[in-house]
């Protein structure tokens, strides 16, 4: 049973590598300049792929990047299809990944709690 899920994961990993390279070298849209592809999930029938991306910046910057990625989706899909031999090349659906921002926020909260605890112990 585990073997059934190994191939979609390998395909997703390969798509992620190819998209990262394409965004770095081929896409000239300034809206997607600092985008990082964090993960790709491919459906079992290979018809759709959720491409998770991260970008540090405010919500307006994220929306611009999302629009840029969506406008480049056809180009990216065709270029990935040239590089990866699949019977069906998935449609690319871009989703903003907020895990990095959440992680940074949690890190700040932990640092603040440690600093407060250290200050409280020093004052006693």
Image: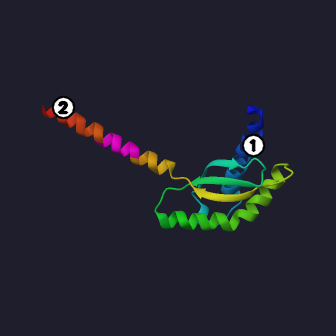
Give the residue at mark 2: 121
Residue at figure coordinates x 59%, y 60% from the top left: 33
The range drawn in magenta is 106-112
Point out which mark residue 92 bears: none
Task: Examine the rendered structure and indicate whether residue 1 appears above or below residue 105.
Answer: above
Residue at figure coordinates x 53%, y 56% from the top left: 55
Chain-order first, disc 1 or disc 2:
1
Q: Secondary structure at mark 2?
A: helix
Q: Main secondary structure of the magenta part?
A: helix
Image position, residue 113 (x, y; %): 29, 40
Residue at figure coordinates x 77%, y 55% from the top left: 47
Choose top left, top right, bottom left or bottom right for residue 72: bottom right
Residue at figure coordinates x 74%, y 40% from the top left: 10
Image position, residue 5 (x, y; %): 74, 38
Image position, residue 68 (x, y; %): 63, 66
Can residue 46 be found in the magenta stretch? no
């Amino acid at each position: 049973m585990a073997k059934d899920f190994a191939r979609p994961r390998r395909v997703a990993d390969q798509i992620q590598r190819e998209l990262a390279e394409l965004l770095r070298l081929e896409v000239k849209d300034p809206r997607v300049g600092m985008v990082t592809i964090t993960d790709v999930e491919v459906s079992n029938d290979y018809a759709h792929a959720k491409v998770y991306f991260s970008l540090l910046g405010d919500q307006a910057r994220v929306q611009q990047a999302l629009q840029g990625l969506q406008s480049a989706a056809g180009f990216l899909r065709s270029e990935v299809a040239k590089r990866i031999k699949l019977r069906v090349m998935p449609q690319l659906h871009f989703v903003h990944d907020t895990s990095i921002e959440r992680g940074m926020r949690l890190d700040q909260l932990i640092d603040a709690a440690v600093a407060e605890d250290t200050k409280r112990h020093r004052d006693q």
